[in-house]
Amino acid sequence: QVQLVESGGGLVQPGGSLRLSCTASGGIFNIYRMGWYRQAPGKQRELVADISSGGNTNYADSVQGRFSISRDNAKNTVYLQMNVLKPEDTAVYYCNARSVIGGQMYWGQGTQVTVSL
């Protein structure tokens, strides 16, 4: 059973930056594609970015050029660097792990990101 623990959310002004971290335990980190999703009030959960064990990345159009996902396989940790934040980035951000072998998916508990004056 994989457990994911997120940190780094908070309140930031528009144009500011935050870095989210997610540390995994209980599994073999390298077999998981890691991702960040977000869910704003009244909206469906959506993919923000994900990254393979080899470092191949994928971004939602809305964050391309502003957000950067990375991972440190030695630390079992994935990061999301968020720059030039906008009010529409306000959401609960969830870490996700998806096994490339059996397809199992795991979720973190979520961390709130609020972009406001």
Image: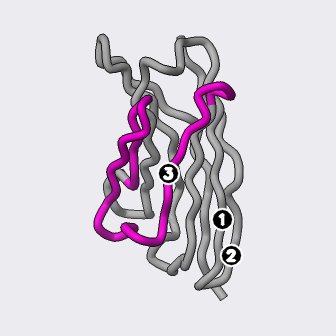
Asked if labels 1 and 2 touch by Cβ distance under 8 angstroms, the answer is yes
Residue 12 is marked as 2
Give me the disc on residue 49: none
Amino acid type at mark 1: Leu
**Mark 2, residues whose alpha carbon is within 10 Å: few (<14), some, or many (≥20)?**
some
Mark 3 highlights which residue? 69
Instruction: Looking at this view, name the residue that lies furthest to the bottom.
Output: 117
User: Between disc 2 and disc 3, whose residue precedes?
Assistant: 2
Q: Which label sits in the foreground, 1 or 3?
A: 3
Amino acid tagged 3? Ile
Q: Position of residue 60 (x, y in %)?
A: 31, 60
Task: Judge left or right: residue 38 versus residue 93.
Answer: left
Count neighbours of disc 1 (C-alpha within 10 A) and say few if under 14, some if 14 to 19, many if 20 or more: some
Q: Secondary structure at mark 1?
A: strand
The residue lying toward the viewer, choosing from 88 and 43, is 88
Name the image quarter holding the C terminus. Answer: bottom right
Q: Which residue is depicted at the point 61% across and 35% down?
A: 72
Quick check: is 72 in the magenta stretch? Answer: yes
